[in-house]
Image: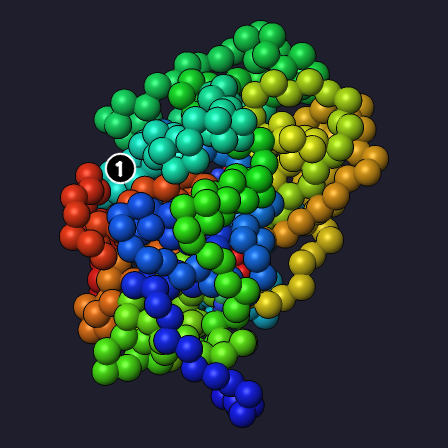
Amino acid sequence: MPRSSSFIESPTSADITVIGAGIVGLCTALSLQRAGLKVALLDATGAGSGASFGNAGLISTGSCIPISLPGMVWQVPRWLLDPEGPLALRPAYALKALPWVVKWLRSSSTANVTRASAALHALHSPALQRYRELLGDERFHALIKQQGQLHIWSQASKPSRADQLVADLRRQHQVPTEPLDQQQLRARMPDIASHVRAGICFTEHANTVSPQALTHALLARFMEEGGELQARSVQKIERLAQGYRLWTSVGDVTTPKVVVAAGAYTAELVKPLGVHIPLEFERGYHVELPNPGVTVAQPFIYKDKAVAVTPMQNGLRFAGTVEIAGLRHAPQSRRVESILNTARDLFPGIHTEGASSWFGLRPSTPDSVPIIDEMAHLPGLYLACGHGHTGMTGAPMTGELIAQLVTGKGCDLRADSYSLQRFG
Ligand SMILES: Cc1cc2nc3c(=O)[nH]c(=O)nc-3n(C[C@H](O)[C@H](O)[C@H](O)COP(=O)(O)OP(=O)(O)OC[C@H]3O[C@@H](n4cnc5c(N)ncnc54)[C@H](O)[C@@H]3O)c2cc1C
């Protein structure tokens, strides 16, 4: 990499440096600071500007189901052929994605799903309690609403083997749910289209009214407690005899320990160190309507199209779709159009004037379980990445587990469930 002579090397006075101030990096930095360490937090584009900016904001404490399930492989062709379907694949990228897709398919066995489910449950179920501790009561209540979440369907199909497994796992992890018939659904959502026939309420789930404000509140806490966010893009991580040198856009930094929490960019940052992470980028989109003219009191996921709908501070947000197209391919306007069509289909007469749109990269592992680990051959280098569809839910306990790995203090999570080594 070419370097200008103006590059200066500054040894940081911090005990540990966190790269990335998304929801994962912020929860991690704050947890490490609370564990008594001096923490430097670096981000290329400012706090909460990546996937953590425009997601659906669902904090799904009962979310214990990975994406890859038994039999799902047979649904993939149907999804891909439907231009309005929940999944899109850029043909030119298909070969590159193939190794990850193969691992994704292997993750769908009942044994693997059961293992992943236990890891997700342990990570997600304490999320609200942990957010409250990180944010403090006042910010927690201003930003997080505990009003449950619905999953709703139009097409009632015969329960599949995967549906049975999902129901069993939710029972096993004691996730409270309440079935809703069409009449009960309409009582909660008077404006919903008549083709929506059934649903489930996850009574203990929550949501934030602004993912952006949530990340800013965590940053505020971090700074109030003595932390500092540095605007630096890390270009390379170099191992030293003791610690690491970070080559950054505004000079180098040496640090005894480093946590890489750079979301979708984590894999390419650590690859030169010989660390290979099976991370794919499940690109997702949102459309936000400032004055939709419909009543949505509770967030919900429309399962037929895998679109989440959340009442946010500034409007009604429709977020979803998975597009496998690589890290740097431009966003596709037809995915936005498809979400808008879903909005019109769910709420005939919805007002779409003033709609804004966004796209972001879910950093996803094949088994939907994040990687929260110290690298065995690189002591002092930690990974906190791969939170896929549930990073807003998994971030608080990720911070807790990293703090445990760094300080050796106790944590309720089994670290081996989140290790990189599980991928062989
Ligand atoms: C459409 C959509 C809807 C979603 N809905 C939900 C939901 O409802 N609930 C839920 O739990 N999850 C949801 N998710 C998933 C969630 O948004 C992600 O899992 C989570 O935001 C990932 O957080 P992160 O901190 O790992 O990554 P990011 O938020 O992407 O943060 C990474 C940070 O690292 C910085 N960075 C990257 N490279 C460098 C570098 N070289 N140097 C310095 N800084 C760097 C970036 O600037 C960025 O700020 C959704 C995602 C999408 C796309």
For the point 63% across and 52% down, the residue is 359
- Please say if 374 is above or below 167: below
- Please say if 105 is above or below 300: below
- Residue 241: x percent and y percent? 23, 82
207 sits left or right of 270 in the view: right
- Residue 341: x percent and y percent? 73, 37
Q: Nearer the viewer, residue 64 or 29?
A: 29
The residue at which mark 1 appears reads as: 122
Residue furthest out toward the right:
353
| Total marks in image | 1
- Residue 409: x percent and y percent? 17, 47
- Residue 30: x percent and y percent? 38, 48
Q: Nearer the viewer, residue 256 or 379?
A: 256
Amino acid type for the residue under numbered disc 1: Ala
Specify the color scheme.
rainbow
Q: Quadrant of residue 18?
A: bottom left
For the point 64% across and 20% down, the residue is 296
- How many residues crowd around disc 1 within 10 Å: few (fewer than 14), some, or many (20 or more)? many
248 sits left or right of 46 in the view: left
For the point 58% across and 31% down, the residue is 209
For the point 33% across and 58% down, the residue is 38
- Please say if 289 is above or below 410: above
Q: Is residue 237 visible?
A: no
Q: Quadrant of residue 117?
A: top left
- Please say if 206 is above or below 282: above
Q: Element type at marker 1?
A: helix
Badge 1 residue CB within 8 Å of ligand 1: no
Q: Is residue 44 visible?
A: yes
Quadrant showing the C terminus: bottom left
369 sits left or right of 210 in the view: left
Q: Nearer the viewer, residue 132 or 92?
A: 132
